[in-house]
Image (tube, grey):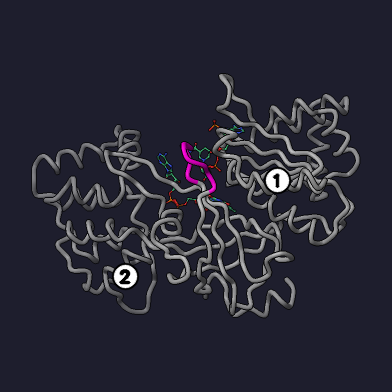
Amino acid sequence: MSAAVDASAFSKDHPFPACLTESRLLNKPGSAKETRHFAVSLAGSGMHYKAGDSLGVFPENRPADVAEILSLLGATGDEPVTPAMLRLPGPLPLREALTSRLALAGPTRKLVETLAGKATDADEKGKLMGLLLPESKEVLAAFLEEREYVDLLAEFPSAKLTPQELTDHMRKLMPRLYSIASSPKVYPNEIHLTVAVVRYATNHRERAGVCTTFLADRVQVGTTPVPVFVSHSHFGLPDDGTKDVIMVGPGTGIAPFRAFVQDREAGGATGRNWVFFGDQHRATDFLYEEEWNTWVASGRVARLDTAFSRDQTLKVYVQDRMRENAAELWSWIKGGAYFYVCGDAKRMAKDVDTALLDIIAQQGGLDAAAAADYVKQLKKDKRYQRDVY
Ligand SMILES: Cc1cc2nc3c(=O)[nH]c(=O)nc-3n(C[C@H](O)[C@H](O)[C@H](O)COP(=O)(O)OP(=O)(O)OC[C@H]3O[C@@H](n4cnc5c(N)ncnc54)[C@H](O)[C@@H]3O)c2cc1C
Ligand SMILES: NC(=O)c1ccc[n+]([C@@H]2O[C@H](COP(=O)([O-])OP(=O)(O)OC[C@H]3O[C@@H](n4cnc5c(N)ncnc54)[C@H](OP(=O)(O)O)[C@@H]3O)[C@@H](O)[C@H]2O)c1
């Protein structure tokens, strides 16, 4: 960690109350997605970052969700509580605990047990006891998966919980991390983020991702303080600017690669940049399209391969583009290129990993074990890095 980084008084334990200076929808009208570009001002914080780091954001829950829980508890919000998970020296008002300290999602089996013990209505008690039977494990998991705390309070009104009893069941509201989409060489006093806003429905209720809708809906640009900290990462560019880099970042996975290209341009890196990007439709979901086109036109981005998955009958993904360009990709890797992946961990990053392994095996004439060893060495040499979530 550099002296400059140490110099800041702000950290995860003491976040900086930042302001948003920009909030802009990146998708065009007609898109099924809501991906936003945010600019966060670091002015006055003394905070420093590098391309590849993430920004931690402490969100607040939706006031409507808090109000509904208060109403179901029959509480005003002023009741003092000391939630077990927060390990606080003293009490805080219930409304504050529910707004900014506790997660309103993720009810547990333990809560169902408590409600079963307290329910006075026979039907409610029967349903709760049924969920707790040893043979109901999967049913209970599916039941809880579809529900937040508010659903349980609404469905079992006879099981009266006190504010303290409810909050003792709740977990801490955690900060969310976002890959930084800007370079400090270009934006020393601000940080850019590329955020997919989470909205969905379960159990006939509209749900809102806590942090993404906090940033998109509840924070006013220029006024609302947003507590943030820089999470320093091992994910990052080689010091040697002559090295080539290959970046695979579909969807919001593109964020750190916008930062990488900005950084290499500003730093005069002479190595080539190859970007793979994918999303649903070219017309509406080509994130930062003009910037990529400018970088391709100037030669800063040597290659840009896109995979718009829903523009044709058959899905096309970034790993398909990698396979189509296997010989070229192998020649870059053989020549010392660094390979980066960012975005969805569950499916995309696994499939990209498989594609990379296959390309190395085929193009390098290696058997599966030798290709796996080759990839292992790439990782050891920090030439294969992932920032996946
Ligand atoms: C290192 C790192 C970097 C990241 N970078 C980025 C980034 O650059 N951009 C970005 O957008 N995100 C990024 N993320 C993810 C980000 O941290 C958050 O997890 C994400 O924004 C969701 O947060 P939220 O609070 O809005 O949603 P939450 O309130 O945490 O809700 C998300 C949860 O909702 C549930 N859910 C979501 N969709 C559905 C659905 N359709 N049906 C049922 N349940 C559903 C799932 O349980 C999911 O886990 C990154 C994560 C990490 C760890
Ligand atoms: N719950 C899930 O299953 C799931 C899956 C992906 C992302 N997410 C989360 O949703 C949020 C928003 O995601 P995002 O906007 O960054 O984009 P994204 O949903 O990851 O999608 C970006 C592009 O990747 C494609 N894609 C889907 N599966 C893929 C695979 N196996 N290999 C390669 N590409 C694949 C998508 O195609 P299609 O959509 O047309 O298939 C789309 O074109 C993120 O927080 C992410 O973690 C959740």
Q: Which residue is mark 1?
A: 292
State the SS at label 2.
helix
- Residue 84 as seen in the image, left or right of residue 125: right
Dot 1 crowding, Cα within 10 Å, few <14, some 14–19, many 20+: some
CB at mark 2 closer than 8 A to ligand 1? no
Determine the CA span between mark 1 and mark 2: 43 Å
For residue 369, side relative to residue 306 (left or right): right
**Crowd rating for badge 2 (residues with CA inside 10 Å; few <14, some 14–19, many 20+):** some
Chain part drawn in magenta: 26-34
The structure residue drawn at horizontal position 86% and vertical position 38%, both measured from the top left corner, is 332
Coordinates of residue 288 in the picture (x, y in percent): 63, 47
- Horizontal and vertical percent for residue 282? 60, 34
Vertical comparison of 368 with 226: above or below:
above
The x, y position of residue 259, in whole percent, is 69, 55
Q: Amino acid at mark 2?
A: Glu
From the viewer's side, name the closer residue of 7 and 215: 215
Inspect this view and state whether residue 245 appears: no
Earlier-in-chain disc, 1 versus 2: 2
